[in-house]
Image: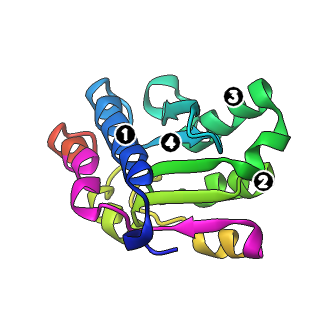
Amino acid sequence: MTATELSETDLRFVRRAIANAVANVEIGNRPFAAILVGADGDILVEDCDRTALSGDPLSHGEVNVIRTAIQKYGLDRMTTATLYVNSEPCSMCAGTILRSGIGRVIYAATGAVAGPYLTGGRMLGQRYPSDAIFALAGDKLRVTSGVLLEEAVRPFELYVARGAV
């Protein structure tokens, strides 16, 4: 599926992930957010990257969402869920997505779009692409990337403007 073939519902959830990432930057965290939506269209869990304020380098939005969803709903519900993310998942998050069995991922900013905004810090500026990891899932995982790119840069622009990098 290409970005132009997404439904209005898909686009609404991508926009919500982008807005959540903006809000996350505003409270002092990094510009990443994820939303897991069930097959029925209901939000199962949404969360953000909490590494800056928690000091936990594993507290990425995708990992936080998946961990909570599995505890709350079990693994069986993951195969029919869609994960919406404001930016390309890193390799750690991609592996977590793969291991959880989520059936569909839609993300806005690709690493090439977000990368130039993330040039400072100990780990920022290094790219940890997800595509090779997602490819391991074969046809069990459908991934759509590069959605709403003009809107997707907002959390990263704010992050830089606040001097976070």
- Amino acid under label 2? Gly
Q: Which residues are magenta?
A: 138-157
Mark 4 = which residue?
34
* Residue 87 sits inside the magenta stretch: no
| Residue at image location 27% in from the left, 45% down from the top | 155
Q: Horizontally, is 136 left or right of 158 in the view? A: right
Q: Quadrant of residue 6?
A: bottom left
Q: Secondary structure at mark 3?
A: helix
| Residue at image location 58% in from the left, 58% down from the top | 105
Is disc 1 surrounded by few (<14), some (14 to 19) or many (20+) residues within 10 Å?
Answer: some
Is disc 4 surrounded by few (<14), some (14 to 19) or many (20+) residues within 10 Å?
Answer: many
The numbered disc on residue 58 is: none
| Residue at image location 60% in from the left, 50% down from the top | 82
The numbered disc on residue 68 is: 3
Measured along the vertical axis of the image, is residue 109 above or below residue 11? below
Q: Earlier in the sequence, mark 3 or mark 4?
A: 4
Say if mark 1 contacts mark 4, CB within 8 Å. Answer: no
Q: Can residue 149 be seen in this snapshot?
A: yes
* Residue 148 sits inside the magenta stretch: yes
**Alpha carbon distance from label 3 to label 4:** 12 Å
Q: Earlier in the sequence, mark 1 or mark 4?
A: 1
**Alpha carbon distance from label 1 to label 4:** 9 Å
Q: Secondary structure at mark 1?
A: helix
- Amino acid under label 3? Thr
Mark 2 = which residue?
101
- Amino acid under label 1? Arg
Picture coordinates of residue 52 (x, y %)?
A: 44, 31
The numbered disc on residue 16 is: 1
Is disc 2 surrounded by few (<14), some (14 to 19) or many (20+) residues within 10 Å?
Answer: some
Q: Nearer the viewer, mark 1 or mark 4?
A: 1
Is disc 3 surrounded by few (<14), some (14 to 19) or many (20+) residues within 10 Å?
Answer: some
Picture coordinates of residue 142 (x, y %)?
A: 63, 67
